[in-house]
Amino acid sequence: MTTRPIEIVGGGLAGLALGTALSRAGVAVTVFEAGDYPRHRVCGEFITGLTASTVARLGLTPILADALRHREVAWFLRDAHVRIQRLPSPALGLSRFVLDARLAAAFQESGGSLQTHTRVTDPVASAGRIFATGRRRSRSAWLGLKIHARNLALTRDLELHLGQQAYVGLTRVEDGMANICGLFHRHELCSRGSDLLLGYLQAAGLTTVADRIAVADLDADSFCAVAAVGFDRRVPTSDRVQLGDACAMIPPFTGNGMAMAFQSAEAVLDPLLAYARGEATWRTTCLACDRALRRRFRLRLASAAILHPYLLQPGGQRWLSRLSRARLLPLRPLYALLH
Ligand SMILES: Cc1cc2nc3c(=O)[nH]c(=O)nc-3n(C[C@H](O)[C@H](O)[C@H](O)COP(=O)(O)OP(=O)(O)OC[C@H]3O[C@@H](n4cnc5c(N)ncnc54)[C@H](O)[C@@H]3O)c2cc1C
């Protein structure tokens, strides 16, 4: 029998997964979401490092059952093929359009109250209120762009192309659709939609990829952009519980922000259940959640922060490429550190 309600600000992966798990355990949960579902998000839609135990604990099995299983990554530097990486365990491919809508439906089916089109403008921390609001705004010069395409043939499950201060990933999601998602250093380019993406690819020296995408059947409705993408590896100690990107944003393509969103929900589940049952104060609960999040993510975030600049700078990219061609790049240990 639970006594205390929980309020979650932000209905993304972390907020909805946590909300559903709490609600299924008998807690009264309300999720406030600024947007609605389904909706496209800027995301590579490639989920790595999510273990069966996290999936089971959060009740995600039916939601992810038909996600594609990806096993191989092809790395390219500019337009040159560098290396094939076999993943230690399959990654999942599912669009955020489908995934977020399924999570929202599961939360409501569990008895949770979902308030869409409701932006919480008062960021005050209070007992029982959790923040899963996604990445924090930053002054960063990085821009994320995403679009879906049909009839785009891929050489491997995921193609990762490193360009001049940019990278782009191409991977398959449901219904034969390919996700094209990139992170670019911002310039003044006078285009919009898919032309903007093509312009950024050209400017980054990724001309072969740009040519392939230009002749694909692009879904204009799926285009989305996000500016000022910052990478904040701080796991905060505070008087509040923050999950997913709101807790710490791992740089895309070195890490697995989607899995981290789910894992952060899993990490705080037990302390929050104890709070809801009246067995702990809110202060003790915040400290317990903070400890659990630090334990789970500290090494991963520190490793990603070291590796990420090498993916973006020409010198670092050349060095990675040489090591990789000589088969000296320790992909398995790196993968283990980052997952
Ligand atoms: C370019 C790019 C590519 C990426 N590619 C990948 C990838 O391939 N694989 C991977 O694992 N990760 C990837 N990521 C990271 C991944 O998208 C995030 O880590 C993940 O979405 C975090 O989930 P979240 O639940 O914390 O936040 P989100 O999914 O961002 O959800 C936050 C939610 O909170 C809502 N919200 C915010 N403020 C308020 C408010 N005040 N009131 C109410 N609601 C609010 C928002 O509307 C949103 O729905 C990528 C990120 C970027 C930028």
Image (cartoon, grey):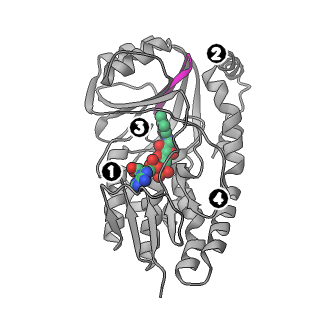
Identify the mark at residue 277; answer none if there is no mark: none
Which residue is at a point 71% across and 18% down the rendered structure image? 319
Q: Which residue is mark 1?
A: 35
State which quadrant residue 274 falls in: bottom right
Q: Which residue is mark 4?
A: 293
Residue type beneath disc 2: Pro
Tell me which numbered mark, 2 or 3, is placed earlier along the sequence. Answer: 3
Image label count: 4
Marks 1 and 4, how far apart at CA? 27 Å
Residue 118 visible in image:
yes
Nearer to me, 266 or 230: 230
Q: Which residues are magenta?
A: 157-168
Q: Which residue is mark 3?
A: 42
In terms of secondary structure, where does tag 4 sit? helix
Identify the mark at residue 314; answer none if there is no mark: 2
Residue type beneath disc 1: Gly
Nearer to me, 30 or 108: 30
Q: Is mark 1 within 8 Å of ligand 1?
A: yes
Residue 57, image x, y percentages? 51, 67
Do callouts 1 and 3 mark residues in contact (Cβ within 8 Å)?
no
Marks 1 and 3, how far apart at CA? 14 Å
Residue 229 lies, with reference to residue 310, above or below; the image says: below
